[in-house]
Amino acid sequence: MVVFFRAGSELRHRLKPDVDDYTRRVETTPGKSVREILKDLGLDPALIAFLYVEGKVRTLDYVPAEGQSITLQPPVSGG
Amino acid sequence: MARGFAGTTLRIDLSKGVIKRLPTDEALFRRWHGGRGVVAKICYDQVPRDADPLGPDNVFIINTSPMSGCLIPGGSKVEFGSVSPLTNGQGDSNMGGHLGPALKFAGYDMLIFNGISPQPVYLTIDNDTVELRDAAPYWGMKSLDCEKQMKHDLGEDFEIATIGPAGENGILFSCITHDFGRQAGRTGQGAVMGSKRLKAIAIRGNRSIQVHDMPGLKKQVTGIIKRTQKHPNMEPWQKYGTAFFIRWSNDNGVMPTRNFQTTYYEDTDKIDGDQLVEKCLITHKACFGCWMNCGKYTKAVIPGKPEVHLEGPEYETGALCGSNLGMKDINHVAYINWLLDNLGMDSMSGGGVIAFGMESFERGLITEKDLEGHALRWGSLDDVEHFLDMVAHRRGIGDWFAQGTKRAAEKIGHGSEKFAMQVKGQEMSGYDGRWAPGMLLSYMTSDIGAHHNRSWTITVDMAEGRESVEGRAKIVVYLQHIRPLMDTWCICRLFWGELDITPEEIVESLNLITGWGVSPEECLRTSEMVWNLNRCHYLERNRANGRTFDYPPARSWEDKIPSGPGKGKGVSREQVEQMLDEYYAARGWDRDGNPTREVLEDLGLKECADNLERIGLLGKAIPGGIPAVRGEKYKPKAF
């Protein structure tokens, strides 16, 4: 299945967007959490503060559905 | 005069009650760019080295930049500066809101106060009409109450900055408050304002600011607005602000907990951002020229206490007045935030001071007898409320804590300096550096004492390896140049740090406004100039080798983290020394932490080199010379 990860700022460079400036198309197995998918991509989940999915905050244990767009929110660089 | 300036600087002698209008010194701004750069240079040139920061010879400056009030994303910031009573070095702090643009719209770039008024006064600026007025009706009022009353008396369209009882009473970590929740909190600028018996500033202006290339600026800013509106991080920022990072900080073992004793707080879910949104949020709030509206206007509702309204708590206050005090209810954290705001204390240093008091109480170093019959226990809101009243009015041992944790530890003794969590007198921000060595080095070497906004490295620490200190100095030097540039330009850091506005775009804006034609490289060099100037200023006032002042409290290297994901982690004394050696080398300073003549003259600061030489603190020449490029762009390995 396919999901779309979106990220900005420093995290964008790590994500390596391929759809537009912020978005990467990711093929994965249904049932995997975002944390597991990030590990598959070689991205350290610790660098992500929370997920933003369809207007709601989610934890990294969120299991995405086919075609969903997931924003990876990095920590604020000094509150 | 270049475009982007209002054209006039006001010099206000409070001792004599005289207000002078001077043409703004464009050459000074061209060299130091505005904001904190100009403030640092004026303080260096005009404040005698032996002047009491709370005496008549200190200056108190409110400054803007050519970008203030000019459509620029986040161009709302206004800079406050003076020699800090907290650190005894150059101090600056800034706030968002609307004050800086209002000052420009009224026709002024900068206000410079000196002297001490014989009686409390406030300054009103209403375009050409500038007056010092009797502040007797407002003296003694709390900050938020005073702002509300002044808006009632003068008009809602006045932008107002006030101090509270803390500033009036010389509490060294006093802040300046504006817009019911924006604070210039750090370095005790509110104490300096209070020492001059200046209660408030009220500004109303309706003039325009001329820019060099208006079509070019509109085109550039329109492009930025369109781009950032599509940015993936924009909507989360708008909805949640910074408080949502508390959980992340805790999960990653950097959360200051019970006075930095550990870095994991078991009750984080009770004080996290989702609690704030669910229980406290009233509405979102934005500064001038901002479409991010990261400010959260909130209420605290607690049985037996009045319902109070405030802005925040954002991340820093949430951490330092939440986990760091052992609070278990977001309403209690918000209430402490409100107490500090209304008394006029920095909620970051304030959280640090309360936490230090709580640990001192836990250890029996201060007792209920010292606290007028009250306790000071982790998690007790009533204890905090009583303690802050003692501090704000300097009653009993409240007077010790009114001077910050460093001086309070000197009074308390019994080794308490080990857990007075400050550097150079300023309390640490809301991240523990024991498992983030770059962050610890950032605190150690910050020119204004421990403050995260000069350099924040935690994700770099993660990428580079959190047990290693190798190479951390170079990233800290780079960040110490680029991040404070935002304070020099008087723009909000979040557009750069979080929404991918590049420094090159900001410099282009500066050039479109002024026609100066500066380069990003020149701006970074200016920032390095400011950093070295402030270091020299600090050494000239405090008269010892720089290295002496750059150590964190011993808890930072003696105590391993006792719990949570960072359990057993920590830096050693040897690693602290290694980081300092590497940092000084990266700056072209000698091993004592003193700037060398070679680096100072390279930056056009010969006068500083001469001054350091005169007092025996000029750095020894470095064999092989200084690095040609200091603060070069640095990319973590993971990129």
Image (tube, coloured by chain):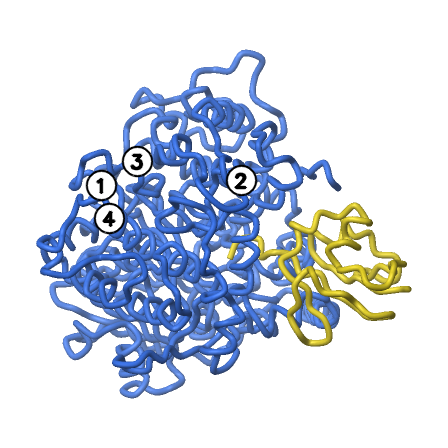
Residue B446 position within the rendered picture, expressed as x and y whole percent measured from the top left: 44, 40
Disc on the earlier residue, 2 or 4: 4
Count of residue discs: 4
Kindly identify the residue that appears in the image at 26 percent across and 60 percent down. B193
Q: Which residue is mark 3?
A: B418
Query: Label 4 to label 3, Cα distance in Å?
Result: 15 Å
Disc on the earlier residue, 1 or 3: 1
Query: Label 2 to label 4, Cα distance in Å?
Result: 27 Å
Residue B533 position within the rendered picture, expressed as x and y whole percent measured from the top left: 43, 37
Q: Which residue is mark 2?
A: B436
Task: Please name the amino acid that badge 2 sits on.
Answer: Ala
Task: Please name the amino acid that badge 4 sits on.
Answer: Glu
Q: Which mark is residue B409?
A: 1
* Residue situated furthest front in the rendering: A31
Q: Which chain is yellow?
A: A
Circle 2 chain: B
Q: Which residue is mark 4?
A: B362
Find numbered disc 2 in the image and state the secondary structure of the residue it sits on: loop
